[in-house]
Image: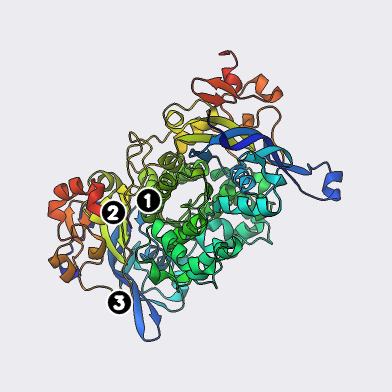
Amino acid sequence: MKTSSFQSWAGNMNEPLLSVKDLSIAYQVPGLDVVAVSRAFFDVPKGAIVGLVGESGCGKTTMARAFTRIIADNAKITEGSMLFDGQDLAKLSEKAMNDLRWRDIAFVPQSAMNSLDPVYRVEYQLNEVLRGRGGLSRAQARKRAVELFELVGIEANRLRDFPHQFSGGMRQRVAIALALALNPKLIVADEPVTALDVIVQRQILDQMRDLQRDLGISIIIVTHDISVVAYICDRTVVMYAGEVVEDCDTKTLLSAPLHPYTMGLKNAFPDIASAGSGMLTPISGAPPDLARPPSGCRFAARCPFATDHCRAVSPTLRQFAAGHSVACHRADEAVVLRGKAENPATWGEMA
Amino acid sequence: MTTPLVEVENAQLHYKVGSAVSAMFGLPSVVKAVDGINFRLNKGESVGLLGESGCGKTSVGRLLVRLEEVTGGSARFDGAEIADLKGAELRRFRSRSQMIFQNPFDAVNPRYSIKKTMAEPLGNAGIAKLEWHDRIIKALELVRLAEPEQYLDRFPHQLSGGQLQRVVMARALILEPDFVVADEPVSMLDVSVRAGVLNVFRDVRDKLGLTAIYISHDLALVRYVCERTIVMYLGRIMEDGPTENIVRDPLHPYTQALVAAVPTPNADQSHEPLPIGRGAPDPRNPPSGCVFRDRCPKAFARCAVDVPLPQKIRNRDVACHLFDEAM
């Protein structure tokens, strides 16, 4: 089974801030459980930015939301643990969990720019967190609000504005300011730059990097965009169909990926630094139905390197090198497979 | 000499905004979404319109398929002023020029099956019903949807984003247009399926010899589909030239910032701050002179006074005072 062969690489790093072990989350629909996250393992080191990458429906958002336990009513953590600062988030009482939210773990939801309440001034919304949750006095809250706006690079005189008076990028900054309000140790940001222009995207990412450096916080960034990960994340966790398929430092992930899915993701992205406009190669097919996952490797149906063994037996996440784990039967052949993966013909004609 | 298919001359699209009350307080009552732009597109040419939100790139696209009409200047298609088309001519224009929208899920009626979605333009164009089935299948095959029959009775929510965007593309192509405007057609799609949709777009364009405009804020995507790029900022054209030159050696300070901001999938990349000021362009209150000057790291006195006119620098048109001496 997966647990037995999995060796944690946490031992050779500093104590992680968050350690996800064997985590499964299922959506319970009448008649069956749809397992959206299936036995996931990964660590978030202190003061690191970790990317959670994968396609729509791969379970990355479900998992990210589970860290704050704000998940759908019919979703249930069925297995595993999420050790955060010595406490298991999966087992905390609702009250204890509620005390952690905003104070220790803050969540920036997807399209955060639309998550602000349009009928309240931004300062009022900051105050909800600062005074309602943080227990600050009116004067303290005011001071902190000004500080927060400075941190994310908005002039303090805009605190009294309504959300519609801000541009999309600025609303995203406000959402980040909200998350920072009570000095959390961990910020979970779901697709923080997806709806933004390239220039604003870059500025927001720079801002997040600066904040992480200055405040020493950890950040989890959920994204489908490998360029976001390349730009800002120290480590990257690749998810496919509910499972973690590869987890390592970003540099290694991009230069020497072990999993064919990771190789495919990189091929599908236009690289302006490359010479000429070479062909982009999509990964053909679609992820499997999580209500009826295949018995073998979940990527096998789309993988150009799949063997009968892959289709029959599900690979387990294992440590391949220090700090680099992968769930692929053919990881040992990665050097050869990487060479083949660069050839578009390998991936078939078209999705 | 080749005759251009699309000719835009000093085109303007000004929206009236606000009320008598806001005008009383001295707030501007006009937003200049497109403010005097010029370009020509030859038959079979593809051009990328590049810029941030609010730069007017989508407005230009909408003008050219007549979802908007110019409020000044001229936009011509095959020699005829688009805004003046009427009756049979307009109907013919409607089948010759098509738009592919950003979000496929917003571009189709969720209660129409794919067959009905595809049949709508055929009905509008008065195509005989007997031909419908074959044309629908042919169009779906063109965008490389395998076994197209299986999609006909499905509904949009039963398709993935990538599949649906191909249906939207097939619908735009079913009347065999000469000219297509694609407005950020892959920005709502997962990165892994973007490549497939872009490849289809390129192939179909080449196969049918389409003239195309590709609207995006991402130069890497524009470069993948267009040999020429027009960079816009606040309703004006900043730079216009071959995409490859713009990528390698951007001349306008705004283009330089756009090129530096392009996301890449490499771990070794510059983390230098972008050479551009913070803040979003405000189309209600553009600066005097050069509209880019308040975010431009190289702005000088003249920029606040004179509007820079496009000038020929090497193989490009650039609207920037930095190049004035070079003249």
Quadrant of the image occupied by residue A246: bottom left
- Residue A20 coordinates in the image, percent (x, y): 31, 64
Which image quarter holds the N terminus of chain A? bottom left
Q: Which colour scheme is used?
A: rainbow
Quadrant of the image occupied by residue B220: top left
Which residue matches tag 3?
A: A292
Q: How far apart are marks 1 and 2 (CA)?
A: 12 Å
Q: In the displayed structure, does residue A215 sit left or right of residue B278?
A: left
Residue at image x 60%, y 16%? B324
Q: Mark 3 lies on which chain?
A: A
User: Camera-side residue: A280 or A310?
Assistant: A280
Q: Mark 2 lies on which chain?
A: A
User: Camera-side residue: A21 or A318?
Assistant: A318
* Crowd class of label 1 (few under 14; some 14 to 19; many from 20; radius 10 Å): many
Residue type, label 2: Glu
Q: Mark 1 lies on which chain?
A: B
SS class of the residue under badge 3?
A: loop
Residue at image x 55%, y 49%? A173
Q: Distance between the residues labelled 3 and 2?
A: 27 Å
Which image quarter holds the C terminus of chain A? bottom left
Residue at image x 37%, y 53%? B196
- Residue B190 versus residue B288 in the image, above or below: below
Which residue matches tag 1?
A: B195
Instruction: Determine which of the numbered discs, if any, sits on residue A29 in the image.
Output: none
Residue type, label 3: Arg
The answer to whether residue A58 is seen in the rendering is yes
Residue at image x 51%, y 38%? B43
The answer to whether residue B97 is seen in the rendering is no
* Crowd class of label 2 (few under 14; some 14 to 19; many from 20; radius 10 Å): few
Between label 1 and label 2, give the one nearer the viewer: 2
- Residue A13 coordinates in the image, percent (x, y): 24, 51
Which residue matches tag 2?
A: A349
